[in-house]
Image (tube, grey):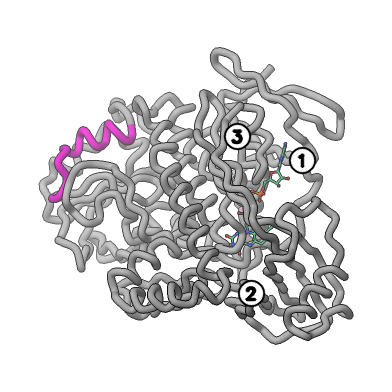
Amino acid sequence: MKTTDVIVVGAGPVGLMLAGELRLGGADVTVYDRLPAPTEESRALGFNRRTAESLDQRGLLPRLGAFRWGPMGHFGGVRFDLGLLDEDHSGVLGLSQTRTEQALDAWLAELGVPVRRGHEVSALRETADAVVVSLAGPDGHREETARYVVGCDGAGSTVRALAGIPTVDWEPTRGMYTAEITGVAPRPRPIGERLPGGRMVVCTPLGEGRCRVVVHDPDLPARPRPGALTFGEVADAWRRLTGESIHDARCLWLWASGNSSALAQEYRRGRVLLAGDAAHEIPPLAAWGLSAGLQDAVNLGWKLAATVRGRAPEGLLDTYHGERHPVGRQLIRNARAAAKLYLGDEAMDPVREVVGELLTHKDAAEQVAGVVSGLGIRYDLAKGDHPLLGRRMPPETTVTLADGVRVRVAELLRTGRGLLLTAADADEAVARAADGHADRVDVVTGDWNSAPHAPLDAVLVRPDGYVAWTSPGTADDLADALDRWFGGRVPQSAGR
Ligand SMILES: Cc1cc2nc3c(=O)[nH]c(=O)nc-3n(C[C@H](O)[C@H](O)[C@H](O)COP(=O)(O)OP(=O)(O)OC[C@H]3O[C@@H](n4cnc5c(N)ncnc54)[C@H](O)[C@@H]3O)c2cc1C
């Protein structure tokens, strides 16, 4: 039986993104999903700045069609002024998750990645050098073998359970109803209207006469029975809280949810890894799930591809858990805090006021905006003191090449390889240090401006866009950084 490099379980946004990243990195990958066709539920209506940047790095933004940039300038309903900040933290709005998934699907088709729908994973068996995956599909049961399996199979992940990976769970304490409707247009309340007693209603217009209504009420069931909700119950709850009737609307889809959260204790166990909602179930109110999951995919893809190609340095794959697990934990904590602010009753008002005052200070606003936008992430990638070390290389940074052509860093990362940027007047030995990594790292010489930070002669950027080494500002030398992130050198003739 043929062994695939990687089987990705789940063709949601995270599985699709991961599969593309793996393919870019040279891995053989197949995606399986239990649904016979993509879902038409719009779910996430956008994503944060960092996720948009990650898609830009792969040239995917223009494929998404029309959307708008807008401020994601609130934390648990407490607004703050994004204009205080030096960088643009606005995110993508007005883009349904269905469209994001369609764009990723089309990308995979171009990359030649098979997405096999109607196949449900029911068992996993790990052998010495592979994982055997049992699938139930249109032609009955069969087994496929892969060197690694990644569970991108969403909340309540089957892969997580089959691999025996435990979770830390936060039990649900209250419920919410969501419905997408057409034919009736309630007054818009896009960031929510708080009502007495810890109740809230949200109405987000979606264009073409559709809108999303959400009802938060402590009286709703915290553990709803799957599939039991009717639109009549949503409309009754809406009228109870707003006095408006939406009973005559046509309901396109509806959803009942509790506010539970869960965090996998290990993002990797042996040859099984987890990403997206399978790794972290963030309470739904924060609306951070899609962004967090796509960031997992971009962090994991190049590392796992290097591993299956035999080029990964020792320990590279484990940096996935090391980097992303703390982010997942922090997002859940922050989402729970935001939910308390958002949905707490009047007793929370003084806390809201204090938080609001704090957020008029630039440092506090920057900290919170960094969580919401994803721009605040700093991985521990090397010892050093340059502020960009461990942070994302601003993708809008323009590099002027020797022939005068100007190119953005985002465009230089399209290949999915690492990037060594060297200044035109930098020591030539710096560019030559990457000779043995020519198949994994592109060397680009030009001029760029790293303001407001100290100027740089050279910077090493990982395929996910994060800065692994700077000159000056990093204690390690470049050769060590290249080996640490990209593995040993190979003679140039054996390059790509
Ligand atoms: C109503 C609603 C509104 C939301 N709004 C937002 C928002 O505004 N912003 C935001 O960021 N997030 C939002 N989310 C959350 C967001 O949709 C999720 O975080 C995101 O879908 C997670 O992507 P994923 O790929 O990890 O998992 P999923 O999208 O859940 O995909 C998992 C896939 O795995 C497949 N699968 C499951 N089990 C198996 C199996 N055994 N074998 C094969 N396939 C399997 C499923 O069929 C599914 O296609 C919302 C969610 C809902 C429901």
**Which amino acid, by three-letter code, is at mark 1?**
Arg
Q: In this view, does 174 lie to the left or right of 238?
A: left
Classified by dominant secondary structure, the portion drawn in magenta counts as helix
- Residue 474, magenta (yes or no): yes
Query: Residue 147: x and y, percent?
Result: 56, 23
Q: What stretch is highlighted in magenta?
A: 472-486
Of circles 2 and 3, which is in front? 2
Front residue (pair 246, 39) = 246
Within-10-Å neighbours for mark 1: few <14, some 14–19, many 20+:
some
Identified by mark 3, the residue type is Val
Q: In this view, does 302 lie to the left or right of 248?
A: left
Picture disc at residue 29: 3
Q: Is mark 3 within 8 Å of ligand 1?
A: no
Does residue 71 appear in this view?
no
Between disc 1 and disc 3, the foreground one is 1
- Could you tell me which residue is drawn at 39 percent across and 27 percent down? 311
